Image (tube, grey):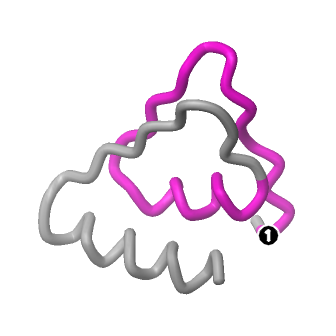
Amino acid sequence: ASEVMWQEINALSEVKPLIISIGDVAASGGYYMACGGDYIYSESNAITGSIGVF
């Protein structure tokens, strides 16, 4: 499911700039999806990363 979501987010970012906001957790597949956007912003205490796919 993360791959499909990434593809859709990536396609949308081709049309207009896409800003991703992470408030709490975006690990593994969640961060993978976020990588489809143009900019990623997160709270200072958010848990991010851990992409085993790349």
Type of the residue with mark 1: Val
Q: Residue furthest front?
A: 24
On the image, numbered disc 1 is attached to which residue?
53
The answer to which image quadrant residue 23 occupies is top right
Taking 1 as reference, is 47 left or right? Answer: right
Across and down, in percent, residue 17 comes to 19, 52
Instruction: Give the residues drawn in magenta, as a range.
Output: 28-53
Q: Is residue 32 above or below residue 20?
A: below
Q: Quadrant of the N terminus?
A: bottom right
Taking 5 as reference, is 26 left or right? Answer: right
The residue under the point 61% across, 81% down is 3
Taking 12 as reference, is 44 left or right? Answer: right
Q: Quadrant of the C terminus?
A: bottom right
The residue under the point 65% across, 57% down is 30
The answer to which image quadrant residue 37 occupies is bottom left
Q: Is residue 48 above or below residue 34?
A: above
Front residue (pair 50, 22)? 22
Taking 5 as reference, is 29 left or right? Answer: right
Please tell me whether mark 1 sits on a helix, a strand or a loop: loop
Q: Residue furthest left?
A: 16
Across and down, in percent, residue 41 comes to 45, 30
- Residue 36 in magenta? yes
Across and down, in percent, residue 9 comes to 38, 70
Q: Is residue 6 above or below residue 18?
A: below
The residue under the point 68% across, 16% down is 45
The residue under the point 39% across, 79% down is 8
- Residue 9 in magenta? no
Across and down, in percent, residue 36 comes to 45, 62
Question: Dot 1, how many residues are within 10 Å of its Cα: few (below 14), some (14-19), or many (20+)?
Answer: few
Front residue (pair 30, 51)? 30
